[in-house]
């Protein structure tokens, strides 16, 4: 690495830290990794209390961190319009190629390196530290935890580079993404290849030279493809496809406060397809986690509870997209209450998150029984309502700016764990008494939905007083 590249990389890391610390609580943001570690340790301990082995937890961590990498890597999908909406009129180093004598491809390559280094320290290391405290206490060797840190970091890199490659390809030809994904699925099915064997998780379960190759080469190849194809775009939404989508959303939205967030998402870079993409990734990760838990423990989790819970929790991403385009204080200029604003946002959120989830649950019918998938269709909207209420209460209309404030994040994580933990336990314990466990799971989700609605009703008055101070 040349000295100039070292300098750029150092500036990018400092830029990322300064950006996060200024947006997310100043010095308190330094406590964010501690909160991550504590929540991971708590979750691992609770799962251990249900009899779940650390190896099964690690399988889930690989998948969830890969999902996080996919979200981080969507810089090409989300586009510069979202950055402007969140940050204002600023230019990040990544987008300085037009004003500085720097190559866009060089900047993007350094950006990917920076993402792996930065989030390895901010997120992956605390996650593995929290897991390791519990796992070592239950007999896992420290060397195994160290290997897991390496493979989970590589899983993050795989997710980030895959997301960037898909986004770059979609920017050039959206149809090519579908063709590429379909070709990949057909190749895996036709050859009988285990898709997990093509990921860094193989290096953890079966260390070998071949496993090292399959762990390292795909992120490098996907990163190279994304860098080669990536082009920053400005999408003004002024074409026939957007106009047809606008008419559809206006038809299904009952009022202006519902239409506004729907149209904002539809006209942003990635449009409503990024909701489908996000839910699709979560659907795939959930399927892999279910498979690995069964392989590692012999326990067959309940598909409906698992899919419904995780797709419902994934609604937070949709919430952030529904609320990110605009200044929360601007509503003070209009004759509307924040109660009405949150109700409109809730309707838009449900249309997008529940609609996308039901689509993937319909796809799940290709592999899973109708009764189990139907249970997921019941649980998912209930969990999604809870997620909306908690997010509205904790972050208001600025989830991206407020959630990574460490105390808020700890509160948010604990609130989600209150609902998610008993549902995950129910999914794992369903074979004890299938009917009783499923009924209990629905009741838990229903209670969560009621709590979510109550929190949504209280969010309006709470944030009205905050914004008028």
Image (cartoon, helix red, strand yellow):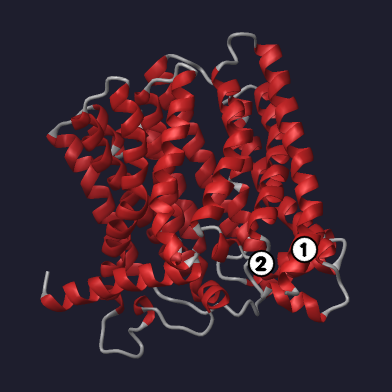
Q: Residue at x 18, y 31 (%)?
A: 143
Residue 19 position within the rendered picture, expressed as x and y whole percent measured from the top left? 42, 72
**Residue at image mark 2:** 266
Q: Is residue 191 visible?
A: no
Give 186 or 148, whichever is nearer the viewer.
148
Quarter of the rendering occupied by the N terminus: bottom left
Residue 131 position within the rendered picture, expressed as x and y whole percent measured from the top left? 36, 34
Tell me, yes or no, whether the two marked residues, 1 and 2, touch with CB atoms within 8 Å: yes
**Residue at image mark 1:** 249
Indicate which disc residue 143 carries: none
Q: Measured along the vertical axis of the image, is residue 421 above or below residue 274?
A: above
Q: Which residue is drawn at 63% across and 48% down?
A: 315
Query: In the image, is 365 to the left or to the right of 132?
Result: right
Binning the other alpha carbons within 10 Å of mark 2 as few (below 14), some (14 to 19) or many (20 upward) gives many
Residue 392 position within the rendered picture, expressed as x and y whole percent measured from the top left? 69, 55
Binning the other alpha carbons within 10 Å of mark 1 as few (below 14), some (14 to 19) or many (20 upward) gives some
Give 33 or 149, whichever is nearer the viewer.
33
Task: State the separation of the CA atoms marked 1 and 2.
Answer: 9 Å
Indicate the quadrant where residue 326 lies. bottom right
Helix or strand or loop: what does disc 2 sit on? helix
Indicate the quadrant where residue 196 lies. top left
């Amino acid at each position: 690495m040349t000295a100039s590249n070292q300098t750029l990389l150092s500036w990018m890391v400092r830029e990322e830290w300064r950006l996060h610390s200024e947006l997310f609580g100043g010095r308190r943001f330094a406590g964010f990794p501690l909160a991550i570690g504590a929540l991971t340790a708590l979750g691992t301990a609770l799962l251990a209390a249900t009899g779940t082995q650390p190896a099964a937890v690690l399988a889930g961590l690989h998948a969830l961190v890969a999902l996080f990498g996919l979200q981080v890597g969507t810089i090409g999908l989300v586009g510069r319009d979202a950055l402007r909406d969140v940050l204002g009129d600023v230019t990040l180093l990544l987008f300085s190629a037009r004003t500085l004598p720097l190559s866009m491809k060089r900047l993007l390559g350094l950006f990917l390196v920076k993402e792996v280094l930065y989030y390895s320290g901010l997120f992956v290391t605390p996650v593995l530290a929290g897991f390791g405290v519990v796992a070592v206490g239950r007999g896992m060797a420290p060397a195994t935890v160290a290997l897991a840190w390496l493979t989970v970091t590589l899983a993050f890199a795989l997710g980030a580079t895959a997301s960037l490659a898909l986004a770059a390809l979609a920017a050039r030809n959206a149809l090519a993404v579908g063709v590429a994904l379909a070709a990949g699925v057909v190749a895996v099915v036709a050859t009988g290849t285990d898709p997990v064997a093509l990921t860094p998780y193989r290096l953890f379960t079966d260390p070998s030279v071949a496993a090292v190759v399959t762990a390292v080469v795909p992120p490098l190849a996907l990163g190279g493809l994304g860098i080669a194809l990536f082009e920053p775009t400005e999408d003004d939404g002024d074409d026939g496809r957007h106009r047809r989508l606008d008419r559809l959303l206006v038809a299904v939205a009952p009022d202006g406060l519902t239409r506004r967030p729907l149209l904002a998402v539809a006209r942003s870079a990635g449009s409503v397809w990024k909701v489908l993409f996000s839910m699709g990734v979560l659907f795939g990760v959930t399927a892999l986690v279910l498979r690995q838990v069964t392989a590692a423990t012999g326990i067959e989790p309940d598909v409906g509870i698992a899919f419904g819970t995780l797709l419902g929790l994934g609604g937070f991403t949709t919430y952030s997209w529904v609320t990110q385009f605009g200044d929360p204080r601007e509503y003070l200029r209009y004759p509307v209450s924040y109660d009405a604003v949150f109700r409109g946002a809730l309707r838009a959120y449900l249309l997008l998150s529940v609609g996308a989830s039901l689509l993937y649950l319909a796809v799940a019918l290709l592999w899973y029984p109708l009764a189990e998938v139907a249970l997921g269709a019941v649980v998912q909207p209930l969990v999604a309502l809870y997620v909306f209420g908690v997010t509205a209460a904790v972050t208001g209309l600025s989830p991206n700016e407020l959630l990574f404030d460490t105390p808020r994040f700890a509160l948010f994580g604990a609130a989600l764990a209150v609902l998610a933990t008993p549902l995950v336990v129910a999914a794992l314990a369903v074979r004890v008494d299938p009917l009783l466990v499923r009924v209990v799971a629905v009741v838990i989700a229903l209670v969560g939905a009621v709590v979510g609605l109550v929190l949504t009703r209280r969010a309006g008055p709470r944030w009205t007083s905050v914004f008028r101070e």
